[in-house]
Amino acid sequence: MSVLFVASELFPYVKVGGLGDVMAALPRAMRALGHDVRMLLPAYPELLAAVEVQGQTVAFPDLMGGGPARILRAEAPGLPLYLLDQPTFFDRPGGPYDHPEDLAKRFAALCWVAAHLGREGDSEGWRPQILHGHDWPAGLMPAYVAYGPGPRPATVMTIHNIAFQGRFPASMLDGLWLPHHAFTPEGVEFHGDIGFLKAGLKLADCLSTVSPTYAREIQMDGGHGLESLMAHRNGVLQGILNGVDRAVWNPAKDPHLVSHYDLKHPARRVPNRSDFQRRLGLHEDPDAPIFTAVSRLDVLKGLDLVLENVDHLVAQGAQLAQLGQGEPLLEAAFRQAAQRYPGRVSAFIGYDEALAHRAFAASDVILVPSRQEPCGLTQLYAQAYGAIPLVRRTGGLADTVVGASPETLQNDTATGFQFDEANGWALGEAINRAMALFRDPVTWRQVQRRGMMAEFGWEHPARAYLDLYASLLLKGA
Ligand code: ADP
């Protein structure tokens, strides 16, 4: 099958969160199964500098008033790319979602070009059978397909996070090259605005999201206003879990670690602990359990619950490390906690890929107390690296962590700790359970081992997406 992904992030060039990781791994896993999957992205300066550009394939005299644009053919290792080169929109510093003044136009332009490639193909005659959009930046792609002329490729939308929806004023309709008849509840209209994600979820032939539990939650009370649309489209919505890219996340080969280890050599994990403690200014205490959160600081990630437990963790003899950036109030609160407990609590405010790898290799517990979590990757990386995830039972966290209980410990299926209520007390109670187990090294190692053995590869999800495409093409035939 021939498939074009439409996306706004691609690790290691442009990554804000899990979407970048998924975009790097999933298309390559599908290509490994023999399918021609390519990706359309904006020609960000970071991408142009890093990938091999092979030439121009299609040009446009103007794209949404931003001036001339072209599509470049390029190649990231093992992944053919189409890059939308439109200097007014994309040739500037900053993250992909900065510059609010033309955010809508930038991603509308990407979607319009995706629909064009889907209908006309590139200048070498390659035309995708499936257009697969990811999150709100790709949301208008099914709209340009639906309202445009000519043959209609099949369209798929995947929700990596329904909280980010891309809503813009109705007055932008003409500027985004959308016909007036598209502005209805059956089309792109969402409570009087243009809703990018809403449009994609309404108009795509089929939908997926990144875990079965999240697929249910977004139809109930976790859809950020899109619940009834999701319930209405239930018949074409699937939950497919993300995986772990073992080429990037493997403690036996990870270039960021001071000591490589695997299931057979768990003792070799230990030097990574003291290295991490040293780097973060934590006491090099071999007996203190290290609790770590690697996360965007956003209210949905529930890091305020961790803040409520700082005193509790320290009183129990644990160390706390926090890696992340985001909400200024949360950043300040973590900084203050670190100042209050030097050597016991550390706050790294920033984004550091290498430090994240070291955190998974060093920590005893990875905290993921999310209020909502579509899939979550850090609890998967934690398991692969022998850190035990402590998670709130929501979304993909519920689907990928088996909470320790007398039964799951007895039958050796436990891979982590879970709690239900999104409050500091419930997290504190789960921390107590983790501390109790930490004092029982034999059982601790059993849970650690079970997590390291968990199969979260990409082949299985890649096959699930391919099945979904195949059934779509069959229906259209
Ligand atoms: P989300 O996509 O909602 O941010 P995920 O758990 O799906 O959450 O993905 C988060 C990704 O971002 C993981 O790869 C995680 O390691 C990484 N990450 C988050 N914060 C940081 C940070 N401060 N430094 C390095 N990596 C980070």
Image: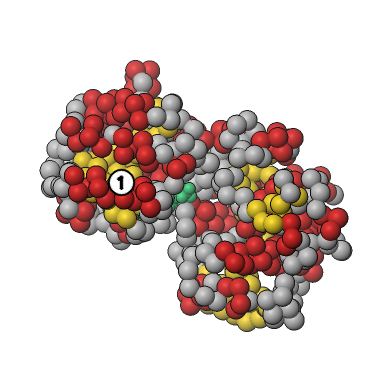
Residue depicted at x 72% and y 38%: 229
Question: Quarter holding the N terminus?
Answer: bottom right
Per the image, label 1 sits on a secondary structure element best described as helix
Residue depicted at x 69% and y 37%: 230
Q: Residue 376 appears at what percent x and percent y?
A: 47, 43
Colouring used for the render: secondary structure
Relative to 439, residue 295 above or below: below
Residue depicted at x 52% and y 54%: 19
Q: Residue 112 appears at what percent x and percent y?
A: 73, 65
Q: Nearer the viewer, residue 103 or 420?
A: 103
Q: Is residue 442 left or right of residue 222?
A: left
Q: Amino acid at mark 1?
A: Ala
Q: Which residue is mark 1?
A: 333
* Numbered circles on residues, count: 1
Q: Is residue 474 left or right of residue 337?
A: right
Q: Residue 63 appears at what percent x and percent y?
A: 72, 74
Residue depicted at x 27% and y 40%: 291
Q: Residue 189 appears at what percent x and percent y?
A: 75, 50
Residue 348, by quadrant, is bottom left
Q: Is residue 19 left or right of residue 355?
A: right
